Image (cartoon, rainbow, N blue to C red):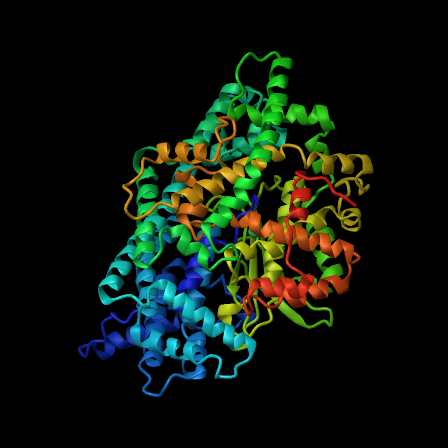
Amino acid sequence: MRKTLIATTVAAALALAACGDNTAPAQTATETVAEAATAVEAISSNPLMVKSTLQYEAPNFNDIKDDHFLPAFEEGMKQHMTEVLAIANNPAPATFDNTLVALEKSGELLTRVSRIFYNLAGSSSNPQRREIQSELAPKMAAHSDNINLNPQLFARIKSLYNQREALKLDGESLRLIEVYYERFVRAGAQLTEEQKTAIRALNEEHSTLTNQFSQNLLAETKKIAVVVDTQAELAGLSDAQITAAANAAKEAGHDGKYLISITNTTRQPVLSQLSNRELRQRVWEASANRNQSGETDNRPIVARLAQLRAERAKLLGYDSWASYGLESQMAKTPQAVFDMLGSMVPAVIANTNKEADAISQMIKQQGGDFELQPWDWEYYGEFVRQAKFDLDESEVKQYFEFERVLKDGVFFTFQRLYGIRFEPRPDLPTYHPDVKAYELFDTDGSSLAIFYADYFAREGKRGGAWMSSFVGQSHLTGQKPVVVNVMNIPKAPAGEPTLVSYDNVTTMFHELGHGLHGMLSNVKFPTLAGTSVSRDFVEFPSTFEEDWAAHPEVIANYAKHYKTGEPIPSELLEKVMKSRSFNQGFDTLEYMSAALLDMEWHSLSADEPLQDVNAFEAQALKKHGITLAAVPPRYKSTYFSHSMGGGYSAGYYAYMWSEILAADAFAYVQQQGGLKLENGQNYRDNILSVGNSRPPMESYKAFRGQEPTTDALLIRRGLKTKVE
Ligand SMILES: [Zn+2]
């Protein structure tokens, strides 16, 4: 759950990739031959305008320049709209082929350029790309509305929907009709013209605000990096971290000083190490007060976004944005989510209080005479962990060398489970020297997909970890997947091996779990492929793979000392695993606080006034009995990208929902003999390959033989003991 989902910007772009602009002016008759010739030339020299000739249409990053994006987007929207209007205005009665299959084939250029651009905007941002993003945001929103709100097009989809049973289609085609119909209805296709105009205006404003939110956040996160004057203040950091901080300061123009960059969550990794309390406070405050002042203040945006979403929900006939959002999810209603989270609050708070007591005790023991503050939690928590588990993270890390984790851990597991293997493809161009390309092969040796591994932190990359696609799978278009995993692992200085935390080890399994959901997709229609499933299902295939990191056969294969190759001592390994249950109260509570905050913001009705952000946050948490000042939410509203900036509004709870499925599935597979091909095949056939081509619970039951229970989740989190 500490991992981000699929890149939200890309998910938004992909949702948009099914859309056009019927208000675009027709080409004027006054266009001269010379102008037309220039246009043709611009098209032919722009590599985005044509399909890449590289394997599986992998982008040729060597040829793509930032100047190519806007013209390709413009042309892509134009072409797409022409295609969509031809479908909508077709005089022949609607058929599955002339409407839905045609829509699925439309927008080829726009899809291509969107996927490439939004991927790069997330993983390798620069000023020009940010400018393009701002310019595109309202245009893409309008393009999307022009399709979703086209009455002729909706009439055709509705007519297919009404006769869907009589059409005698296969299951996937039937599902496609239902998915399209629901998408159009939810976008406002049944509204009056007046309501549609209102929705369009709200959508454009929404798109501009979410984009502004993300840009403010990116700018501010860079700006608030903490500059430290002396090395003495950095006591507690390793030599490598100090060198990295000195290099970062130099790059940022603070030669001779040290720079601590701020990561995306409220809590900051260095807080567990820094012994200087004042510096800890500075770092924590820089993080927690993010985007609350100056030009990049996100508070007015947050307040308006919450109100605007409520207004949009009201137009569509719902009480709140949460009611609207959850209807299409597995959870169905906001109440189901409040019930799920609420039922856990007492147990989680009880655990967290115990942890706080132990930490306060430790502060006293260390001679401290102050009340536990959020910036103390991790530092003194580390001493409690040491006392309890006697675990030295830097010793542990020596057994998790990056390359070995990837090849002998992650790739090894997937070979044993699914029979697949990854081969390096150094010949394929990538968008940064740190990014490595691989080709994925099936059990029978046939080629399945291209995979880019982009694991290391760098400037311009969004925080967190995610998976995304450059090319989606579809039998209809004959396309095979080109998928990327992006993470922010701190890279070791040149010539030294990168050692990763066990936390990052599980994230590598997690993200490639999403990766396989994309790469092992085996469906006909692009709309239903891979990770295009409901939000509270999408984290299931990724979370499911996390626990293999600790499977005895797997860990024996990869957890070896980076110098000697000695396997991790069993005693140390046991400590690592036991210590995983440590701080579960805090971890769960900070997550639940953020999930509840997200739900509360989106439970507002349209009649309520603009909220005071800080007051609203405090009130929302208090309402659910969460008042521990030392445990702030994992994200506060002004930097809560999932909730405010991206596609997870009223959806942050989904991580836990998916975790219920993942824990249940993993426990089931262990009962069936664990790491073996038969288990992988069942999972691949029923979950990974089907995408959204059938309802998620149907897929789950096909795999598992029954619906999931929460038992395995509670055991996984140490909130319940296993009963044999
Ligand atoms: Zn994920």
Residue 256 at least partly seen? no
Total marks placed: 0
In the displayed image of the protein, which residue is found farthest to the bottom?
A: 92
Q: Quadrant of the C terminus?
A: top right
Image: 454 above or below 687: above
Q: Residue at x 49, y 61 (%)?
A: 61
- In percent of width and height, residue 385 lies at 68, 27
449 to 397, vertically: above or below: below
Q: Is residue 576 above or below residue 7?
A: above
In the displayed structure image, the side of residue 211 where residue 412 appears, left or right: right
- Residue 199: x and y, percent? 28, 59
For this rendering, which residue is in front, 683 or 15? 683
Q: Quadrant of residue 353?
A: top right
Q: Position of residue 106 (x, y in %)?
A: 41, 75
Task: Name the image quarter holding the N terminus.
Answer: top right
For residue 608, side relative to residue 116 (left or right): left
Q: Give the residue at x 38% y 75%.
A: 158
Question: Does residue 668 appear in the picture of this structure?
Answer: yes
Q: Is residue 122 above or below residue 448?
A: above
* Residue 410 screen position, x and y as percent: 69, 53
Residue at (76, 63) in percent of width and height? 677
- Position of 156 with respect to 593 (left or right) is left
Residue drawn at (36%, 63%), measured in percent from left and top?
Answer: 187
Looking at the picture, tell me which residue is in the foreground, 401 or 471.
Answer: 471
- Residue 622 versus residue 545: which sits nearer the camera? 622
